[in-house]
Amino acid sequence: MTVNKTKGRLILQEIKFSQVYERKVHKCNDRAGKITLPFELIGKKVYVVVEPEES
């Protein structure tokens, strides 16, 4: 898996959605984290948005 760490502005085209989930990332091991989502979302495309740190 390739992860590109970038920051800036992201402008998406209009996306239809049916639900919005807010989850906290939990530590999975020393190198990864995970979020838990409903079983119905397995195989679906999801987007993860990371909030900027407050200064």
Image (cartoon, rainbow, N blue to C red):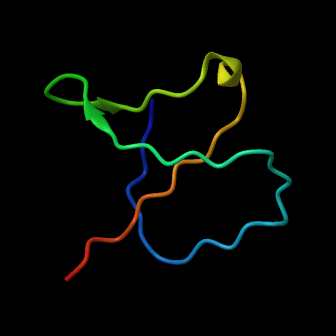
Relative depth, front residue between 5 and 19: 19
Q: Residue at x 35, y 43 (%)?
A: 24
Q: Residue at x 42, y 59 (%)?
A: 50
Is 16 placed left or right of 21 in the picture? Answer: right
Give coordinates of residue 28: x percent, y percent.
25, 23
Is 36 placed left or right of 40 in the picture? Answer: left
Is 24 placed left or right of 44 in the picture? Answer: left
Q: Residue at x 72, y 45 (%)?
A: 19
Depicted 50 relative to depicted 20: above or below: below
Q: Residue at x 38, y 56 (%)?
A: 5
Give coordinates of residue 49: x percent, y percent.
50, 57
Depicted 7 relative to depicted 29: above or below: below
Relative depth, front residue between 20 and 16: 20
* Screen quadrant of the C terminus: bottom left
- Badge count: 0
Which image quadrant for residue 21?
A: top right
Relative depth, front residue between 50 and 38: 38
- Residue reaching furthest to the bottom: 55
* Screen quadrant of the N terminus: top left
Depicted 2 relative to depicted 53: above or below: above
Give coordinates of residue 38: x percent, y percent.
59, 23
Is 55 placed left or right of 35 in the picture? Answer: left
- Residue reaching furthest to the left: 30
